[in-house]
Amino acid sequence: MPERHVPDIVVARLPLYLRALSAIQREGLAFISSKELGERLSISPAQIRKDLSLFGDFGRQGKGYEVNALLARLRRILGVDREWLMVLVGAGHLGSAVANYTGFAQRGFRIAAVFDNDPQRIGVRLGEHVVRSADELDAFVRAHAIRLAMIAVPASAAQTVADQLVRAGVRGILNYAPVTLTVPPSVRVENIDPVLHLQHMTYYLSAEPEAAGTS
Amino acid sequence: MPERHVPDIVVARLPLYLRALSAIQREGLAFISSKELGERLSISPAQIRKDLSLFGDFGRQGKGYEVNALLARLRRILGVDREWLMVLVGAGHLGSAVANYTGFAQRGFRIAAVFDNDPQRIGVRLGEHVVRSADELDAFVRAHAIRLAMIAVPASAAQTVADQLVRAGVRGILNYAPVTLTVPPSVRVENIDPVLHLQHMTYYLSAEPEAAGTS
DNA sequence: TAGATTGTTAATCGATTAACAATC
DNA sequence: TAGATTGTTAATCGATTAACAATC
């Protein structure tokens, strides 16, 4: 019932809670306290309680949160209590891996079709898909009212693909290409660039030349 | 010379600056202002100036930042002004895609070897690698003083692999498995779980039942 | 009941932004 | 010079944490 302004940074943590709770459910635990959940996720118990309290009172004093109930509620909040259809654009090495990854369907994200503009790849079988021509992308997205897409094309082609997707009605893009996409404010983009993560880590692994001492 | 306490959130933005500046360099621009860089990245100019000023005075009033010089400096700050060797554990669909991705080597991250514990996969050619037995992992990491690793094994095996890597001396792990890893504080972990990003987006794409109006 | 843990408030902490003198 | 943009300070904004009454 509450559902006040939910900061985006809180929304970003909810899937993490969901993932951890799924594991806890598989372990057969019926209740979990914010303390223990926090330990598993390296998040403070206070933060977990505060985040969850934005959406209602799920906990029970003295016991913690009922795992099944909280899982169901989080799925509902995140909108993953149903199946989502996605299109995948790009059938190279990365696109192939994405198409073959079973984790999407397991968690409710089904790839409805895979597209590429390379004649060499069109028609090729990819897991349970046959790669389609990018020419069919617009019609397919419209026909199936697809709202989610994944881009796994080279950086040079990513913006063009994004423009096509947006025009066809896509509202969320998971972008694997190492470029910042420009889209209208009504469209959400999330980026995955593994090199960015590696560079983040090397900062800490590189002994800074001047700053030898810690203090 | 300055190099005061650098917040981690600033460190996380530096690779983004680096990536954008590389593109700007390819376009042939010699100078870029914080205003224009900010527009490309959807980051405020003030934030860019503040972030960069933590590391010194790179800019020139009236002109902006010299692209080449800033690029070189950022590479040095992040520790990517040299090549890093990595090991990749897991040679399934995802591991194969990672092994074949040319973007790592292009940006200075070289995969030195690929490991798997499935006899079916050991010995198989993967891009320029031949998959090795996981039994050799520890010795290899030590022999080559490897500090970075990527985990692309099933969730159920990820923690065990992480433990092995840490014992062998790895200091940074890029984890593709959808689990939270537990490692000593001296080891850094970055996670990539595409489903988490999708769930983040579906929150906004799902019309909340009760919150029909915007206000 | 005694013990444990929630939900929430207030305090703290940290990050972002606005503004502007300095200066290329 | 006039115009543009930096580096930096102070103000604002927002997020995290500590603490505790409420209560299962």
Image: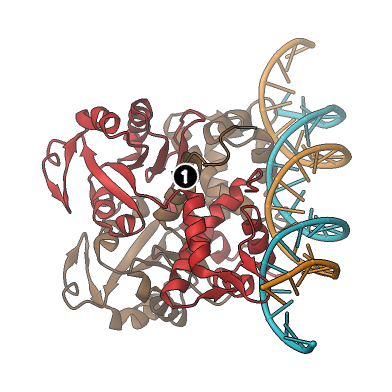
Chain colours: A brown, B red, C orange, D cyan
Horizontal and vertical percent position of residue A137:
33, 79
User: B9 or A107, which is in the foreground?
Assistant: B9
**Residue name at image x 30 percent, y 55 percent:** B105
Kind of residue at badge 1 = Met
Read off the chain for label 1.
A
Horizontal and vertical percent position of residue C22:
79, 66
Toward which corner of the image does residue D12 lie, by quadrant? bottom right
Count neighbours of disc 1 (C-alpha within 10 A) and say few if under 14, some if 14 to 19, many if 20 or more. Answer: many
User: A46 or A32, which is in the foreground?
Assistant: A46
**Residue name at image x 60 percent, y 37 percent:** A43
**Residue name at image x 30 percent, y 51 percent:** A102
Residue occupied by mark 1: A201
Q: Is residue B152 visible?
A: no
Horizontal and vertical percent position of residue B147:
37, 37
User: C13 or B18, which is in the foreground?
Assistant: B18
**Residue name at image x 62 percent, y 70 percent:** B34
Horizontal and vertical percent position of residue C10:
88, 40
Residue B90 lies, with reference to residue A164, above or below; the image says above
| Relative side of A158 to B35, left or right | left
